[in-house]
Image: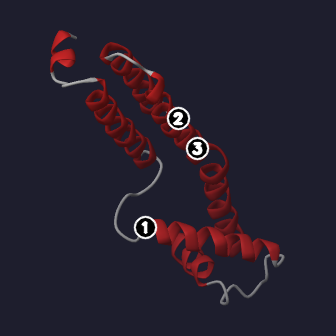
Amino acid sequence: MQLDLAKFADVAACRLWAAGEIDAAAGRARSRYLTTVPGQEATYTAKYAQAQAYISAGYPADASPYPWIAQESMRSGLTPPQAADRIKATGDAWANIIGPAIEGLRIGGKDALAALLTIPAVLAHARGVIANLDGT
């Protein structure tokens, strides 16, 4: 613990370090649920929007106007409705539960740093937030 205290010039430097560590922990938490390769975020967004549109259209028998659904169905062995439902369920969980929980911990953890006046308090807080994110 003493080494932690000595590595910071002042509490402001410690807060800056803690904010970065909290952001990194949020990134690790997200990567437990999302594939983190270039272009994947856009893929998830497009698939989710298209699944919602396909479902809203009443699960049309012709899925060709919904290429994300049609391709996933064809290549997974699922029917188009099954593929759309799976994509939507995954997207709903991310959009309504998992993503907001991670972001709430991240932002709340970082916002609280400003009120902490000592290096030990910042370190203890950061470790707690990181532990929560690591458990998400």
Q: Is residue 64 above or below residue 106?
A: below
How dense is the environment of label 2, judged by Cα within 10 Å: few (below 14), some, or many (20 and up)?
some
Q: Is residue 41 left or right of residue 47?
A: left
Residue 77 visible, this orientation = no
Which mark lies nearer to you, 2 or 3?
2
Badge 1 crowding class, 10 Å Cα cut-off, few under 14, some 14 to 19, many 20 or more, is few
Residue for badge 3: 98
- Give the number of the mark in front: 1 or 2: 2
Amino acid found under the numbered disc labelled 3: Ile
26 over 109 or under it: above or below: below
| Pick the front one: 41 or 112 | 112
Q: How far apart, in angstroms, are the residues tagged by discs 1 and 2? A: 24 Å
**Residue drawn 28% across the image and 27% down it:** 14
Dot 1 or dot 3: first in sequence order is 1
Residue 71 image-quadrant placement: bottom right
- The residue positioned 62% from the left and 77% from the top of the image is 69
Amino acid type, mark 2: Leu
Which sits earlier in the primary sequence, circle 1 or circle 2? 1
- Determine whether the residue tagged by mark 2 lies in a helix, strand or loop: helix
Q: Is residue 75 above or below residue 131?
A: below
**What quarter of the picture does the N terminus occupy?**
top left
Decide if residue 101 is on the left or right side of residue 124.
right
Mark linked to residue 40: 1
Mark 3 Cα-neighbour bin, 10 Å: few <14, some 14–19, many ≥20: some
Instruction: Please state the horizontal and vertical placement of residue 38, each as a whole percent of the image.
Output: 35, 68
Label 3: which secondary element: helix
Amino acid type for the residue under numbered disc 1: Gln
Residue 72 occupies which quadrant of the picture? Answer: bottom right
Q: Can you tell which mark lies on residue 105?
A: 2
Q: Secondary structure at mark 1?
A: helix
Task: State the image coordinates of residue 44 (x, y, percent, origin top left).
Answer: 53, 66
Coloring scheme used: secondary structure
